[in-house]
Image (tube, rainbow, N blue to C red):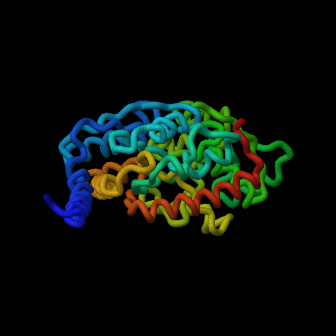
Amino acid sequence: MPSLSHRVLLAGLALCLSAPVYAQSWPQRPVSVVVPQPAGNSPDVLCRVIAEKLSRALGQQFVVENRPGAGSTVAADIAAKSAPDGYTVLISDSSVVTMAPHLYKSLPYDPFRDLAPVTLAVVVPMWLVANPSVPANSIAELVALAKSREQPMPYASSGNGSIHHITMERFKTETGTDFAHVPYKGAGQSVPALIAGDVLLGFVGYPAAASAMKSGRLKVLAFSLARRSTLTPDIPTVSETVAPGFDMSAPLGVFVAARTPREIVATLSATVNDAVRAPDVVERMAAIGMEPVGSSPERYEKILHEDYERMGSLIRRIGMRLD
């Protein structure tokens, strides 16, 4: 019979061997991919592309489940309360961690305790557009016009607390202007309202507004990132014109439940990064204004903490609450 020391040694060896075997065996069954957006919009389409790539790479089906609601926090809560085994994956804008805690009095999950970051997959920038009736042909002219008016011009967003709302509120703060917020239920409502002149301006994503931007039904004044877009190289950034340092986008990241084995997180991170950097995916994203990133879990966690502080400061400054 083995001695006690031998039994301890064998037990330790078994533990050392079990972790990589567990990681290599994942996934052994279909994986649920929870997405906060409704089916059919651009982030949902991207999530389905990523899910398809993961299915092929890892040999199991990654099945997209659309769970919209409460500013993406419904989907985040599902992932946060799931078993920490890698079989529930959340693909969501980072706001479920960086903005929601500042916007809501309480959340059903703790963003840093209950969710484990996997990778920052892509960023989704925006363009500042205006109805052609607005007598401003540049962002500098828009700022001057806004300051000269007694009544603020109405602007559209995709909903209270949306990245479009937060971005315009930051723009107002940094340029000393005032615009009246008109929230809509998504870009499917806000962009037609902009074209019709029901509202006069707003930050919009490329897929929803590309046709109107190209045809002149919407006037394009500026780009939200600090550097210009390859889609609209002639359009200046907000940062280079009226608000130095302005840099806003909707980051789309991947999360799992906290305490998911590190080996599974690492495997998922590497596979998602490969997916978003694949030439066919890069080409498809470029056509709809999305830009691939890909990061380590550690790097994404650092970004989330930095953005949590930055967004918290902005939200407190503008006094925004959703409850």
Is residue 205 positioned above or below 30 on the image?
below
Is residue 92 positioned above or below 310 on the image?
above
* Residue 284 position within the rendered picture, expressed as x and y whole percent measured from the top left: 32, 49
* Residue 30 position within the rendered picture, expressed as x and y whole percent measured from the top left: 26, 36
Q: Is residue 119 left or right of residue 162?
A: left
Instruction: Residue at 56% x, 36% y: name it.
Output: 191
Q: Note whether residue 126 is visible.
A: no
Residue projecting furthest to the left: 1
Residue nearest the viewer, comparing 260 with 191: 260
Q: Quadrant of residue 296?
A: bottom left
Residue nearest the viewer, comparing 284 with 129: 284
* Residue 291 position within the rendered picture, expressed as x and y whole percent measured from the top left: 41, 56
Instruction: Residue at 64% x, 55% y: name it.
Output: 311
Residue projecting furthest to the right: 150
Instruction: Residue at 68% x, 52% y: name it.
Output: 136
Is residue 44 positioned above or below 117 on the image?
above
Q: Note whether residue 144 is visible.
A: yes
Q: Is residue 139 left or right of residue 42?
A: right
Residue nearest the viewer, comparing 173 with 321: 321
* Residue 315 position within the rendered picture, expressed as x and y whole percent measured from the top left: 70, 51
Q: Quadrant of residue 90?
A: top left
Instruction: Residue at 70% x, 50% y: name it.
Output: 169
Residue nearest the viewer, comparing 269 with 282: 269
